[in-house]
Image (cartoon, rainbow, N blue to C red):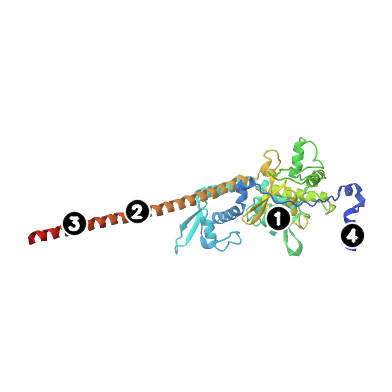
Amino acid sequence: MALLAMRRLRRWAPCYPGNLAFSHTQKSNYVDVRMKWKKDPFYDTVDILIRAKELKSLISLKNIIANEPTGCIPVSTVSKLDRILEISGRVASFLRKYPAVFEEFTGPQYNHPWFKLTQEAADLDRKERELYAAHRLEIVDRLRKLILMSREKRLPLRIVQGMLWYLGLPEDYLKSSEEIQNGYFQIVGMQDGEQGLSASIGPNEEVISVLQRNAMQLNGNIGSPPSVIRFPLFPSKGLRLKQKIEIWLEEFQKLQYVSPYEDFSTLDPNSDISEKRVVGVLHELLCLFFDNSAERRKLLCLKKHLGLPQKFHKAFERHPHVFYLLLKNKSCFVVLKEAYCANSATAIETHPLFNVRNEYVRLMRKSENILRSRRGLKIFDEASHRNHDESLSSSNTKLCCAEREKISDLFERGINNSKRYAL
C-alpha cells in the first residue's frame, strides 16, 4: 500500500517545485492505445525495404570480394561466415542466388568453386566508393548526430559498429577512421572497461532536428524553431482511430517539443511530454539512416544511451500515423512514413548512397530474372529431349511394323510357290 501511494504521489504531485511553470506542462493524461497492426500494401512494393535484410548480406559479401587484391575468392573463404553475414542457409547458395552480382568459375586447384564480381557489380562498387569519398563529411556527420543524441555524448564502439550499415559508413570505418585520427571523434573509456566514441558540440553551435527544420520551413525560415511542433501524420488506408484516441492525439500534438539533442534530465518519465520526446528521438534516429528504416530489434541496444524507456518499442504501435511496422522474412522493420509519403514537403535529406544501394536492389531483381530464364531453358531442353525420344520410339515402331509386314508377305509368297510346284 505504501508503494502504491508513493507511485500516485510521484505521478500527480508537482515534480519540480523550483520550476512550477515547466512542471505544470508535464501532465499525465495517459490513454491506453492498443491498436491492431494494419497492413499497408504500399510499403510491400518498395524493394529497398522488403529486401533490406538480404541487401546487407549481399553488400557485405561484395565488399569482401572487392577488397581482395585478385578480385576473387574461393567459396571456402566465406563458407563459415553465415552467422556473421546473417545468411540463413549455405553461403554458396546465397552467392549463386544472385548471378547478376557474383560470377562463379572453377578455381585453379582441386576444381573448387570461386566467385568474382560481375562487370556491372564491379562498376557499381567503384561508383559507390567515389560517392562515399565525395560525400564523406556529410555521411560522417550522421554518426556525429547519433552520438550527440546520447545522454553522455558518447556511445560504445560495439554499438557504433552495429549502426555503421544504417548510417551508410563502411564496415571497417572504426579501424581506419580519419576523423578519429584528426580529433573529430575521440576514443574514450566507458563503464565495464568498454571503449566508446565521443563527439562534442561547439560553444555557439546549435544542432537542429528534422522536425525543427520542417517547422522553420513552414514559417519561412524566420527566427528560431517554435517550442510546439506537430508530428507530420500519414494515415494508412483503412486505418481508423477511436474517438478517444483521436482526442488524445490532438492534445499530444499540442505539447512542447523537446529536441533529441537537448538535455532531458529534468523530464518526468511518466508525463506525455516525455513520450513526445521519445517519439521525436525515434523520428530523428530514422531520419539519419540511409533508407529511413531499421530492424526493430537492432534498436534495442540504444535504449539505455538515448534515454528511452524500457518498452519504448510500444511507441511504434501507439503512433501508427508516424511509423509503420513492416513484417518480412520473420523480422520486423520500422519505417518512417514521412520519408516515403511527404515527397518534397519534408526536410529529410536523401542519403548520398541511397540511389547506389537501390541499384544493387535492381541487380537482385535482375538475378531473379536470370534464374527464371535458366529454369525455363532447362524445362524447354527436357521437353525437347522428351519429344525427340517419343519421335524416335514412334519411328522405330513404324519401322518394326513395316518389317513385319514385309516378312509376312515374303512368307505368303513362298507358300504359294510351293503349292504351284506341287501341282
Question: Which image quarter holds the C terminus?
Answer: bottom left
Q: Quickly name the residue at label 1.
A: 299
The three-letter code of the residue at mark 2 reads His
Q: Nearer the viewer, mark 4 or mark 3?
A: 3
Residue 156 vs residue 228: left or right?
left
Q: Which mark is residue 388?
A: 2
The three-letter code of the residue at mark 1 reads Leu
Q: Label 3 near label 1: C-beta < 8 Å?
A: no
Estimate the spatial distance between the alpha carbons at disc 2 and disc 3, rounded to whole Å.
32 Å
Q: Nearer the viewer, residue 410 or 61?
A: 410
Estimate the spatial distance between the alpha carbons at disc 4 and disc 2, rounded to whole Å.
88 Å
Q: Quickly name the residue at label 3.
A: 409
The three-letter code of the residue at mark 3 reads Asp
Residue 309 vs residue 62: left or right?
right
Q: Label 2 near label 4: C-beta < 8 Å?
A: no
Residue at far front of view: 423
Q: Nearer the viewer, residue 92 or 106?
A: 92
Q: Residue at x 87, y 55 (%)?
A: 11
